[in-house]
Amino acid sequence: MRFRLLHHLRRRWKRVMIIAALIGPGIITSNVDNDAGGITTYSMAGAHFGYSLLWSLIPISLALYLIQEMSSRMGVVTGKGLSDLIRERFGIKATFYLLTAIFFTNLGNVISEFAGIAASMELFGVRRGLSVPVAMVLVWLLVVKGTYKTTEKIFLAASTIYFLYILSGVLAHPDWSQVFHALRHPTFSFGPGETAMLVALTGTTIAPWMQFYLQSSIVEKHTKWRDYKYTRLDVFTGSVIVNVVAFFIVVVCGATLFKGGIRVDSAEAAARALEPLAGPYCSILFALGLLNASLFSASILPLSTAYTICEGMGWEDGVNKKFSEAPQFYGLYSILLLFGGGVILLPGVPLIPIMYLSQVINGVVLPAVLVFMLILINNPKVMGEHRNSMIENILVGATIAVVSFLSISLIYMTLRGQS
């Protein structure tokens, strides 16, 4: 009896250790998407439309999981990153154009992350001339001098800080009966403002860089197929958490700013506006969440870009390698950090056009990346017996159609607004 109990406990402990070793990429990738731009979008959704768009976070969570699951499965089965597979199956020319588009759209996103760091620290009285250079150095040292395990642990710890937004939601004292009513009874007016916001909510949650980073992270972990169920759990958990955080950001802004008739156009403006309505603690938590999100994303987005380009070009990559072993990888990472942070320190830089251009490129690139993924995951030479089922193809195909429609709509509305 005692032997059986010990054997059972050993098996349980072994399973816990496997989960602990494999957990991370899915949660980290999804949480990074709650960056400065994402928090701004969720804040505006709550401030401008109250709780009326909360229902959309449910299908968005499902779409995110479907796409992320494909990335993780390809990484485990092939042991190769997404851009590596695209180069092998679609050729150098297609890979070059895709990598160029991803580089420029991610560069715009990196600039916006450092803008978020500067804005959040200014809420605490720290000038950007100090906060941005310090952030650049800390982020660079973390990745260049750290190992994959150390870096991942820090990123996972940063992911837990997003729960500050849940606390903010509680401190805002929303009418929960109205919140759940909005979830149970979806409404949508198809007005231009509400349509544009729905497009933005979808676009800020599902981005091209995520698929490349997730697959590269899983490859670097050397995950075996027999343990894939734990990786899939990691991806599912990340897909849920990111939208739970989004839910509470919308709720806190809906309960305070929308109720007070206050419209905001940025996350830092939301943090400032919350203080007289929900109290200083709610405002401080919201600002701390913005700082964490911006710093976290400023670390991951350049890393994702370096992974994507180095894999596509066949160069050495990986956080576990030394600078001398992967000079292109660390060189690209350093350049993106220097440029992204440096732009914020220049006076009079037009940040809005930069963000606008990155959004447009992102809208063009995302459907193409999803189509590449769907073709690859159904290729028997790539995936063997682990290809998509018919139901998965239908669901993912529908997701691609909807995401493509929303992306094209975003481009059209943006261009129309600029004209």
Image (spheres, helix red, strand yellow):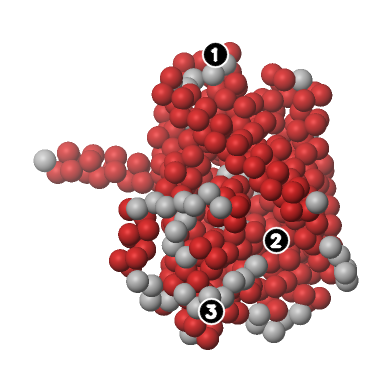
Asked if residue 165 shows in the view, the reply is: no
In what element is the residue under mark 1?
helix
Please name the amino acid that badge 2 sits on: Glu
Q: Is residue 303 left or right of residue 5?
A: right
Compared with 389, 178 (above or below) is below
Residue topped by disc 3: 274
Q: Earlier in the sequence, mark 2 or mark 3?
A: 2
Q: Looking at the picture, how far across and down is residue 45, in whole percent?
A: 54, 61
Q: Is residue 367 above or below residue 361?
A: above
In the image, residue 322 lies at what x, y percent? Answer: 74, 46
Classify mark 3: helix, strand or loop.
helix
At which x and y percent is residue 330?
78, 47
Disc ID at residue 113 = 2
- Residue pictured at 76% horizontal, 80% vertical: 127
At a point 44% along the width and 59% down the height, the residue shown is 52
Frontmost of labels 2 and 3 is 3
Query: Separation of disc 3 and disc 1 at Cα?
Result: 53 Å
The quarter of the displayed image where residue 340 is located: bottom right
Is disc 3 surrounded by few (<14), some (14 to 19) or many (20+) residues within 10 Å?
A: many
Q: Nearer the viewer, mark 3 or mark 1?
A: 3
Marks 3 & 1, CB-CB < 8 Å contact: no
In the depicted structure, whether residue 417 falls above or below residue 60: below
Residue where numbered disc 1 is placed: 380
Residue type at the position of mark 1: Pro
Image quarter (top left, top right, bottom left or bottom right) of the N terminus: top left
